[in-house]
Amino acid sequence: MTCNSSKDKSVKQRVIRSIKEVLPNTTKTCIWIVRLTVIVSLLIVFLQYFNILPLISKFLSPVFNFIGLPGEAALPFVTGYFVNVYAAISVMVAFDFDVRVITILSVMVMCAHNMITETAVQKKTGSSAVGITLCRTLMAFILAFCLNKVLPGHSGTNFIENAEGTQTLLEMLKNWLFSTGRLVIKMVTLIYILGILQKLMNEFGVIKLLAKLFMPLLKLFGLPAKTAFLWIVANTLGLAYGAAVMIDESKSGQIGKRDIDLLNYHICISHSNFEDLFLLSAIGGIWYVLLVSRWIGAMAIVWGLRLVYYEEQLINKR
């Protein structure tokens, strides 16, 4: 009885200590990500109001024609590129795209969305902002080009209508205030929960267990086993919500810079594979194409990077 009591007390102390240790860094990350989200989202409101995004889309129309998509597909892509998946969907459903176009466009949006905020998160963990931006943008177009060649023609109708009309600046700011407020509450809650969860999982050896469990899949992707927890976080919740955990882990020194880089170049292409995948499938995207195509793209990048690192090692040994 005394032994069990002392064990319970020890576990409780470890839990309290872990929570106390994680709170300061998590709070700093929360402040940083919230500030960034508010500034970027407000900037996008003004870009939308002054019709800057449609102008960019019109400029990109010939590029979309080249990869086999209608010129109108540029508008949802550019919207998602600077805002997020939700914004891209709201524009996408306004057009009468068939299932094939929706699937290809959805892959592009999942590869490259919310670029300013998510790239800032990955830069904070030590990867190159330019490298991540180029990787996501180029992979979006490469996958679209390839899918255009291999996907058979699908017939399908988008039954969701976009009811949103022209808004005044005041209405747009009011909508921005409410939507950003909800997003910030959700983001802060998840960041704290994830930060505490990650610390407790480290403390009680759960991350080592996860690493063993996911080792075969991570080996296939070319990723180190020690990145297992971060890979799970990115694939379930995404980059913005997983920011605190990723930044904390990269600064702890438990995962080397090269390993973080490999992970970042994988998850920049393939992340948020629950909510985003479900939403884009709901409007007509073929879910397994959305998932598998990005996994293949992410694998190609990581194994390519591994080859570059291997050649660098050989050169350094000479």
Image (spheres, rainbow, N blue to C red):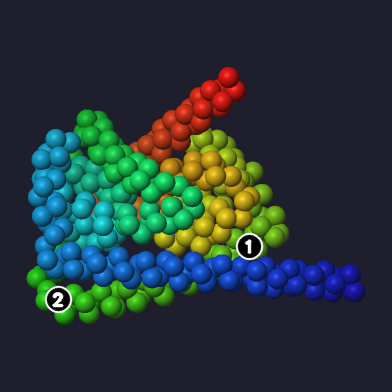
Residue lying at the far top of the rendered structure: 318
Task: Name above or below for residue 182 compared with residue 67.
Answer: below
* Crowd rating for badge 1 (residues with CA inside 10 Å; few <14, some 14–19, many 20+): many
**Residue 39 locus on image (x, y percent):** 31, 69
Mark 2: secondary structure: helix
Residue 214 picture quarter = top right
Q: Do the residues bearing badges 2 and 1 touch, measured as CB atoms within 8 Å?
A: no
Frontmost of labels 2 and 1 is 2
Amino acid of disc 2:
Leu
Describe residue 286's horizontal placement relative to residue 2 as left or right: left
Residue shown at the point (28%, 78%) measured from the top left: 177
Residue shown at the point (37%, 37%) measured from the top left: 297
Amino acid of disc 1:
Lys
Which numbered dot is residue 169?
2
**Residue 301 locus on image (x, y percent):** 41, 35
Q: Is residue 282 visible?
A: no
Which numbered dot is residue 45?
none
Residue shown at the point (17%, 36%) measured from the top left: 67
Describe residue 268's horizontal placement relative to residue 164 as left or right: right
Circle 1 is placed at which residue position? Answer: 199
Residue 161 picture quarter = bottom left
How far apart marks 2 and 1 lie (CA) works out to 43 Å
Residue shown at the point (29%, 39%) measured from the top left: 138
Q: Looking at this view, is 202 or 282 the one in front?
A: 202
Describe residue 35's horizontal placement relative to residue 195 as left or right: left
Task: Name above or below for residue 144 compared with residue 129.
Answer: above
Pointer 2 or 1: first along the chain: 2
Quadrant where the N terminus sits is bottom right
Q: Looking at this view, is 280 or 16 the one in front?
A: 16
Q: Is residue 266 visible?
A: yes
**Residue 87 locus on image (x, y percent):** 24, 61
